[in-house]
Amino acid sequence: MPDTLTPDICVIGAGSGGLSVAAAAAAFGVPVVLIEKAKMGGDCLNYGCVPSKALLAAAKHAAEWKNVTPFGLTLPAPRVDFARVNAHVQRVIAAIAPNDSKERFGGLGVQVLEGVARFRDAKTVEVGNFEIKARRFVIATGSRAAVPGIEGLAATPHFTNETIFELKRCPEHLVIIGAGAVGLELAQAFRRLGAQVTVLEAATALAHDDPECAAVVLDQLRQEGIVIRERVTVTRVGQNDGKIEIIINDDESGPIQGSDLLVAAGRRPNLEGLELDAAGIKYTARGIVVGKGLKSSNKRVYAVGDVAGGQFTHAANYHAGLVIRNALFRLPVRANDGGLPRVIFTDPELAHVGLSEEAARARHKSIRVLRWPYQENDRAQAERLTHGHIKVITKKNGLIIGCTIVGAQAGELITTWTLAIAQGLNIRHMAGIVVPYPTLAEVGKRAAIGYFSASLTNPRLRRLITFLRRFG
Ligand SMILES: Cc1cc2nc3c(=O)[nH]c(=O)nc-3n(C[C@H](O)[C@H](O)[C@H](O)COP(=O)(O)OP(=O)(O)OC[C@H]3O[C@@H](n4cnc5c(N)ncnc54)[C@H](O)[C@@H]3O)c2cc1C
């Protein structure tokens, strides 16, 4: 006979979304069961955000010697001990892991069960010897690397994000399939740490990002020696003479040969084994179908994070907050993933929130596009970080509806604009803000002032704008 548990909330998956739901529910004294089949912390901690940012940080240091000459310095090229780089990555994971651990969550009052959860019926989940009959269920099972059905791929050794961070040697020539955020962040990291890197993309690199800003990142990556080939279809993968051989459709120069292969061609939701049909939960290949309140077709069951169409840790956390409000306090909620920022942590960084210029033009009759280059920023000059710009999109009346920043610290700078859009601020608020001098944040203020200058015919006002630009 299985043990029957009757918590208020049963969470499936202990990644970013599941942990946030469980921690918040426990903080309100609600009985919670949390089920995890593999590692506590999920993708973000173990195979995603944390190891990738740790690897990028090591790579940034490895590239420093190339950038110091203008400062009057000469540094020798570094000797990269990749096993120690990997140890650094593992230490960063280990430092954060206690926050996500079974012990910590047990201490918070969450009952953590290890195993694969599956629905038996609309009201019951089974795991090992337990059956859980909860008032509410939250599915937070995340996603995994989508491995395309390329001929020969299954039989050819390849890495995904779940295995690449175990690598203790630097690949001689890493071929990456996929030029999205994951593929390009790792391309730059491995290149800077000493690998030759080729990235193959079936469509356009960074296709979801503002082309003008994406081009700044792609130029930099190419300048660093990364080969990025767009609009190529990988038709076959195999091994030849100890090398990985990749055949592409327009291959005039013969197959591409690499020492290692990384597949970073998108994500697939983790739905397998959950027996969703048994619980009347609708899903598609993109994940669990949820309404604005993140409820599935089974009203007892919510879905959050990547399995519900999210793509980021902060999206999973945001979803978790909404579910807590609705499930515990019966407050109406409406998820708006369109207002969430996203960052690609290459160097330079690419950060975006709200509507892109293209989307804004499609939605609104008249918009304003305001730009300001890092080149015109005093701090950027002092730091020699002049590569990049900000692009702010407003409605005709000045309402801020989108922002993209490419350049140093873009991921930090985007937060102000996220707040501005969330709060419905007008560009005049950003033009009037007092920004400490000299900071990169001034690029935002300068772009905002531009809203008032373009249509000015009054010479006195024009002089005022010039004054503000210089001293404001
Ligand atoms: C290389 C890489 C870099 C990334 N970098 C960033 C970044 O810089 N910033 C950012 O915001 N996002 C980043 N992401 C995305 C981020 O990792 C995910 O959006 C986030 O982890 C999603 O959280 P989640 O809770 O939905 O799922 P996950 O974190 O994947 O957690 C799901 C958990 O559910 C468990 N599970 C699955 N099925 C079952 C089952 N049947 N029973 C029990 N347990 C189950 C899994 O084992 C897993 O632990 C990155 C992703 C990758 C791959």
Image (cartoon, rainbow, N blue to C red):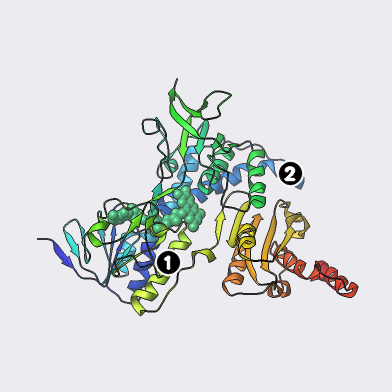
Q: Which residue is mark 2?
A: 73
Q: Residue furthest left?
A: 1
Dot 2 alpha-carbon crowd within 10 angstroms: few under 14, some 14 to 19, many 20 or more: few
Residue under the point 65% across and 69% down? 400
Quadrant of the rendered image containing residue 463 = bottom right
**Residue 168 versus residue 191: which sits nearer the camera?**
191
Disc on res. 109: none
| Ligand 1 position by quadrant | bottom left
**Residue 436 versus residue 246: which sits nearer the camera?**
246
Return the disc, 1 or 2, that comes first in the chain's sequence: 2
Amino acid on which disc 2 is placed:
Leu
Residue under the point 44% across and 29% down? 237
Mark 1 CB near ligand 1 (8 Å cut): no
Confirm whether residue 118 shows in the render: no
User: In the visual, does 107 lie left or right of 350?
Assistant: left
Q: Which residue is mark 1?
A: 319
Q: Position of residue 461 (x, y in %)?
A: 86, 74
Quadrant of the rendered image containing residue 466 = bottom right
Does 223 sit above or below residue 133?
above
Dot 1 alpha-carbon crowd within 10 angstroms: few under 14, some 14 to 19, many 20 or more: many
| Quadrant of the snapshot with the N terminus | bottom left
Q: SS at mark 2?
A: loop
**Residue 373 versus residue 333: which sits nearer the camera?**
333
Amino acid on which disc 1 is placed:
His
| Quadrant of the snapshot with the C terminus | bottom right
